[in-house]
Amino acid sequence: MFLFPIEKDNPTRNPVIWVWLLLAANCFVFLVTQYALDWDSVVAAAAFVPAEPTLATLFTSMFLHAGWMHLLGNMFFLWMFADNVEDVLGRWLFLPAYLFCGVAATGLHMLLDPGATVPLVGASGAISGMLGLYIVLYRYAQVDLLVAVRYSSYTFHMTALGAGLAWLGEQALLGAFASAGVSSGVAFWAHVGGLLAGMLIGLLCRLTGRVAPKPERALRIERDKLENIWCPYCGTKDVIAEFGLHVCSCCGIEYDIVVDTEHKA
């Protein structure tokens, strides 16, 4: 059984830059290392090995991926959750937060298995940190939790916080199995470390108020019917009684709810 949190409609306020640069950088590095260089030599030089840790590989390993599915899976979740995180944190804070989550993820993996000689590659630890930030900054945002069991799948609708904590529990359980000797080739504890680091940053941002400034004008949100909505800035769910200008009951941001003319009958 595997859990996959899938973000629903949660538009960003401003264009994001770092998310697209990270997507491009990861794809570029993948193409170069897979098709222009010798992969074994790349792993020996740039992958992180807990038994032989170096400062350089702590960062270079975040941009290495072992195959197309590894790359596409990570980039999908980076694109899904990190845009809202950059939107709230701002461009100056986002990249340090991303790298810190990646380092924390690798650090927990090494702490629990310091003698491991299997190279660690991939951006999943840092991206797990983006999910951790998301579920703190947008804890009431609506998320579909996809549960895959053998050849079947089930979808559960819940808040981002509920889906994120469920995924955290799954990763910790799988990590415990891996520590007990059930090998899977996946660094589950790195996922746990990254998500916890992201949650910590999100909590610090909320406590200190160090988030991006609110927009100068109301956000435009299109809807084809009146329904409860979560604030695109702080994630608080509000009851919407009519179309028009609405003020969030928590953070005070204004957003204009208008009729979606393309889907309105």
Image: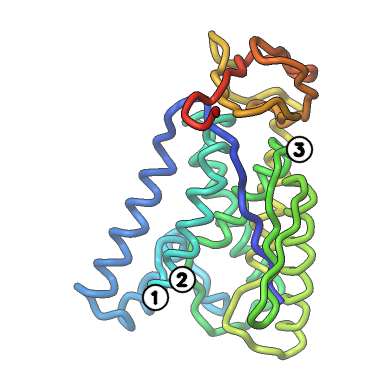
Q: In the figure, is residue 2 to the left or right of 94?
A: right
Residue highlighted by disc 1: 67
Q: Nearer the viewer, residue 176 or 76?
A: 76
Judged from the image, the secondary structure of the residue bearing numbered disc 1 is loop
x and y percentages locating residue 80 in the rendered image: 53, 48
Q: Name the residue type under label 2.
A: His
Q: Nearer the viewer, residue 250 or 128?
A: 250
x and y percentages locating residue 82 in the rendered image: 53, 44
Residue at far front of view: 265
Q: Residues within 10 Å of mark 1 (few under 14, many from 20)?
A: few
Judged from the image, the secondary structure of the residue bearing numbered disc 3 is loop
Q: Which quadrant of the view contains residue 189? A: bottom right
Q: Which quadrant of the view contains residue 188? A: bottom right
Residue drawn at point x = 48 percent, y = 49 percent: 79
Marks 1 and 2, how far apart at CA:
5 Å
User: 79 above or below 213?
Assistant: below
x and y percentages locating residue 90 in the rendered image: 52, 28
Q: Name the residue type under label 3.
A: Tyr
Residue highlighted by disc 3: 140
Q: In the figure, is residue 221 to the left or right of 139?
A: left
Residue highlighted by disc 2: 70
Question: Is the residue under label 2 in contact with that under label 3 (CB below 8 Å)?
Answer: no
x and y percentages locating residue 162 in the rendered image: 80, 51
Q: Residues within 10 Å of mark 2 (few under 14, many from 20)?
A: some
Q: Name the residue type under label 1.
A: Gly
Marks 3 and 2, how far apart at CA:
29 Å
Marks 3 and 1, how far apart at CA:
34 Å
